[in-house]
Amino acid sequence: MKSFNFKQLLKFVGRKDSYERKEVIPASRDWKVLLVSAIVGTVFVAIGSAYLFFEIDNERIFQNRRPPSSLPVVIDRERMEKAIGYFEEKTRQFEALSREAPKVADPSVPASVH
């Protein structure tokens, strides 16, 4: 690849015909840059994924630091019955609404007809 010549760029800045003397940059250069950056990005993602995999596999990350509880789980029956009652009430309301036709006012019918 060619090195960037900053002095040559400064010579072109003040000239009117500077665009005619500039070197044409081939499109293959852009494709090479895109390909190299995609490969580098893929390598970084693969390395990061492998690192994360081995950290999880060796149990150094995402650990549960607290010991398992030896106490039995106690369920509050009153709260559970209250929650079940709430959902039963919602079910009854849904069934009642689904049996009735909705009462929607038709704007095309005059109010005196109702």
Image (cartoon, rainbow, N blue to C red):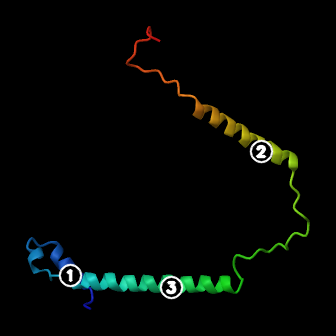
Circle 3 is placed at which residue position? 46
Q: Which label sits in the foreground, 1 or 2?
A: 2
Q: Amino acid at mark 1?
A: Ala
Cα gap from disc 1 to disc 3, whole angstroms: 29 Å
- Residue lying at 25% horizontally and 85% vertically, measured from the top left: 29
Circle 2 is placed at which residue position? 83
The answer to which image quadrant residue 109 occupies is top left
Circle 1 is placed at which residue position? 27
Cα gap from disc 3 to disc 2, whole angstroms: 48 Å
Mark 1 or mark 2, which has the lower sequence index? 1
- Residue lying at 86% horizontally and 55% vertically, measured from the top left: 75
Cα gap from disc 1 to disc 2, whole angstroms: 67 Å
The answer to which image quadrant residue 58 occupies is bottom right
Left or right position of 1 against 103: left
Residue 14 horizontal/vertical position (percent): 15, 72
Left or right position of 107 against 32: right
How many numbered callouts? 3
